[in-house]
Every structure is written in structure tokens, then in C-alpha cells.
Amino acid sequence: MAAAEPRLERLVTRRPLDYRAVVAPVAVVGGWAVLALMNPYFLTVANGLNIAGQFGILAIVALGELLVIVTGGFDLSVGSVAALATVVGARAVNALGPLGLPALALVGALCGAVNGVLIAHFRVQPVIATLGSMLGARGLALLLSDGGQTVALRPDIDLMPLGYGHVAGIPGTFLWAAGLAVAATVFTRRIRLGRRLYMIGSHAAAAELVGVPVRSTLVWAYALSGLSSGLAGLLLLSRAGAGLPTEGSGLELSAIASAVIGGAALTGGTGSPPSVFLGAFFIQSLLNGLNLSGISPFVAELVLGSVIVLAGLLDFAMRRIGDGPRRPSWGY
Amino acid sequence: MTASAPIAVIRTRLAAAPASLYALALLFLVLALVVPRFATVGNLTNVARVAAILALAAFGQAVVLVTGGIDFSSGSSVALTSVVTVLLVPSLGASEALLAGCLTAVAIGAVNGSLVAWLELPPFLVTLGMLIAGHGLASLLVGGVPLEAPASLGLSRLSQGTAGGLPVPIAVAAVAFAVFLVLLRRTVLGRTWYLVGSNARAARLAGLDVRQSLLLAYVVGSLFVAAAGLILTARVSSGQPNLYPSLPFEAIAACAIGGVPLTGGAGTPAQVLAGVLIVAMIQNAVVLLNFSPSIQLMLIGGLTVGAVLVQQVAWRRPSRAWSAS
């Protein structure tokens, strides 16, 4: 009888190789190898720091997107919301000075909360709700900027240190993103609300039966995604020195691709922030490397689109190998 | 008694009509009363011309929506259709080039359909990827700038000419609507799409070839989009990589506003048409009233969410518990 115990313990503790966690590191190493072969300048410290500086915005949005994807939904509005946040933020900062900066986070969180209420309380499909807010936020951004003009910051306000500053040689935007990645990791592994996102993504009905407040948790997930768009908008605003109403289209796709490459299942229930951080790093490296090699931006678009579809294929493959018999909800 | 029978028939007919048709009629009345120059023959023809292109895209979108999928790639499909057509005119001749343009769109549909049907990838991811990749490809083919169409193509007939007394785009959309109607109502394939959309597993257990019907849905959908692409090409008379990037979003909005649920398995051709006309009339009214185009974006976005919201609240009162979906 006693002999059965260690065996049982071994069964419980020995986990199969987590295929999903492997993809992002492999993609980054493989991608860097290819890009370094294409252009010798790619693998220099200067360019590494350059990528690190560029990718903060994508990483922050992708981390927010992950929280929503984990619940089994997704958020198409992140790019428009970031653009709206820069416009509102630029106006608020011009009126109030640095006190106006929280407006960006507020706008983001508010847009996200609206998505969340529509999806959780009114059961509007995530596609429709976030598509609507994508159009709505873009329209509002254009409206508040006289039809798409950039909203320049007052000359006496300089946000450049925020967007381009360095701490010990490391770009500040990278540190922002890394800090948020750590926060998101703690949130999804140690905080009750974070754990509940996974329960909902795995089986919403079961989660509700064991007492998870599904609706309010979902609203939180979308609000946090919106908040991260607002923070990305803050970096955009500080780098450009102006509100950019037409910025950020396509950001949602790069963010979803980052999340999937980072091993998040589009069927919900799995995904880890550090991997998504790496996934975003991979996407930004790809765009940077293609750009460095003097390849047309259109090829970069072609590659990005293919990477998104490939990420889906990867998700399919991992469902087959890693998750065993688990089938997508629309399985046939 | 004899007099009341037809009235009863009319009454049941009216009750069965989709709510979006009433919304359409109401909107038309309001716009005709409020917006100057709206209800003139010239303006309404103009609305119909614009609606024709959106309608073609929306029919294609609706076919996919009925199966429970979604298609974002049409924004790039029309661009690729136009670029490929114009590029190939010198070497292939006009009619072959038009055919090649159509085939490009169909090829995209086939790729989408295969990935969705056989590899069970989420439709939104596949078609978003194709939207980006297709735009990259179309831009690459012409170096990012519009390529003017040679006059020999005779494209102007497609946008300016008339067929059977109607402007060609409207005539094409009318024929496409008839095809769309028969396809969804009267063919085995069309009925299969509804079954697959409402319960794919049950459809498979009932002996239907779910994968094949899904593939065909994306291919047939892309045929409608190809027609929209050709008319758009004729209108701008060039190969444009940035032809109509918001087309899929407007098409989805039109379907949602018409009352086609995005969960699949339901939705009628009349609803799609009503949604298209509502979107086209609002776009027209915004221009006539001299509002900024950003208002148009917000209106369409708000209407889309609002329409789905109304459907959820009025017809499928959200249950208290989260049913396993």
C-alpha cells in the first residue's frame, strides 16, 4: 500500500514536456539566426538595443491581449484604443500638464470596460463588440483631432525621456514592458482574479458553478487589456511628442500573433506572460530584421500575415501533440 | 370573411418579416424627411451604386457567417483582384485578365477554406492573416502605387454602362442577390451551411461532409467578393493595392445590422440586403449632411454593436447561467 504512494506522486509531479512554452524561445533563436545571416548588422549590440526600444509598445499590448485570449475571447480594438488614448492624452496634457497623463490609462481602461460589459453582461460576441469599439474609437480619435491631424504637445512639455530614455544603457520602453511582464506573470500565477481568467477560458459554465463571478471577471480582463492599450498609447505619445489618431492599425494582429507564438491557445485556458513577451520580441525582431536588410515593407507585411497563419497552424499542431485529446470547441 | 383573408395573409407576412426591414423603412422615411436632397432619383441611384459593391461583399460574408465563420480577407481580396487584373491585361488580354483577377480572389478563398476546414484553425485568425499578407502581396506586385488600367480593358462598361436599363453594378448585385437567395434557400449545399453553422458535430453525425461544405462556403464567398473587386477596379480604373481596406468590416457590420447572428446557423438573404441598405443610406446621409467622415465610423461601429445588443436582449434574453457554448 505504502509503495503506491511514491508512484502516484511521480505521476502527479512528472509533467509532460510543455510544447507551448518551447515555441517562443525556439522562434526567437531561429529567427535571430536567419536574420543575422541575412544582415551582419542585425546581430550587433546597437541593433539589439534598437529592437528592445521598439518592441515595448507591442509587448505591452500583447500582454493585455493575452489576458483576454486566456478567457477564450480576443480584442480587436487595441490599436484604435491606443490611438484614441494618444489623442485624448495629448489634449489632457496640453490642458493640465503632467497631471493629464493618467488620462491615457483611463481612456484605455474605460474602452476596455465597455467591451467587457458588452461581452460579459450582454453576451455580444467578442468579434462584434471589439470590432464596434475598434471603429468607434478610431472615429472618436479622428473627431477629436479635426479629422486625423496630429495633436502636437505644448512646446514646454517634453515627454521624450519617457519614450527614449535609458536606464543603465537599457531603453526605458523595454524596462516598462519587462516590468509589466513581471506584473502580468504574478497576476496570472498568484492573484485570484488572474487564476479565474484561466478557469473561465477552460470552461466558463464549470467556473460559474464553482463560484467564479464570470461576468465581473470578464469585464476586468477586457478592462486590463484596454489599460495596456492606454499604456502603449503613453509610450507612443511620448515617442512622437504628439497624439496620433491614425496610428496603431494592425497592432491588434501583431499582438494576437505574439500571444499565439507565445503559446496561448486561441481556444482559451492557457498562455503565459513571459512566453508572450518573447513572442512579441520575435515579431519585432522579424520586422526590424527585414527592414534592415532593405526588404520592401510590403514583404514584411506578407511575412507578418504568413506568421499569423503559421501561428494558427502551430496552435493546431500543439493541440494535437501537447494537449492530447482536447479538441477545439467547434471540433467536428 | 373574404376581405379579411388577404389581410390576415399580409399580417402574417409582416410579422414574419425581419425586424431590420422595418428599421430600413423607418430609416428611409426619417432620412427622406430630414436630409435635403436625399429622396431624389439621382441620389437614390447613387446610394444603390455604392450599396451594390457592399452588397456583393456582404453576400460573400453572409455565406461564411452562416457556417459560423468570419472572413476578414475580403479587404485584400478585392485589392489583389484589381491589381492582378490590371497587371495581366497587356499579356493576356481583357477577358482573360478579368478571369485571372477573379481566380486570385477564389484562390484566397480556397486557402482560407482549406485551413479552416481541414486544420480547424479559427476563421478570424486565418482570414486576418490573409488580410495582411494579401495587402502586402498586392502592394508588392505594383510597387505600392496604383497602376492605371489600359483603356483597351473596356472596364468603364462595368462601372458606367447599363444592363437591362439598370447601371451595371446594380444589375450585377441584383443577379448576385438572386443567386445568393436560391443558394441559401433552395440548394442542398446552402441548407448544409446552416446545419454546419448551428451544430457542426451534429451535421457530421448526420452524414454530411462538413469539411467540404466549409471549403465551398469560403470559395463561394470569395466569388461574390471577386465580383465586388471587378466593379471596384472599374470604378477607379486602376490596380489599387489600397482599394477598399475597410470592406470586410463594413460587410460584417451590414450583416450584423441586418440581424445575421455571428454565431452561425441563421440569417436570411433579406436581412443581409436590409443591413447593406441601412449602412449605405447612413453613409450617404453623413455625406449629404456634411458631417465629418469620423462620425460615419462611429455611427457604423455603434450601430453594429447596438444591433447585436438588441438581438441579444430582445430575442435571446441572456440566461442567468453561463451555458456551455
Image: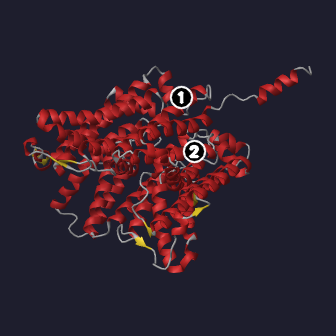
Front position in the image: B212 or A22: A22
Residue sitting farthest toward the left: B152
Tell me residue B7's x, y (percent). Answer: 31, 48
- Which residue type carries mark 1? Ala
Query: Which of the two labelled residues, at mark 1 and mark 2, occupies the earlier sequence position?
Result: 2
Can I make out residue B183 in this image?
A: no
Q: What residue is at 25 percent from the left and 67 percent from the top?
A: B288
State the quadrant of the C terminus of chain B: top right
| Image quadrant assignment for residue B108 | top left
* Above-or-below relation of B115 to A215: above
- Which residue type carries mark 2? Leu
* Above-or-below relation of B142 to B26: above
Front position in the image: A199 or A185: A185
The residue pinned by badge 1 equals A317
Alpha carbon distance from label 1 to label 2: 20 Å
The residue pinned by badge 2 equals A278
Label 1 neighbour load within 10 Å: few <14, some 14-19, many 20+: some
What's the chain of the residue with tag 1? A
| Image quadrant assignment for residue B230 | top left
Front position in the image: A34 or A216: A34
Local secondary structure at mark 1: helix
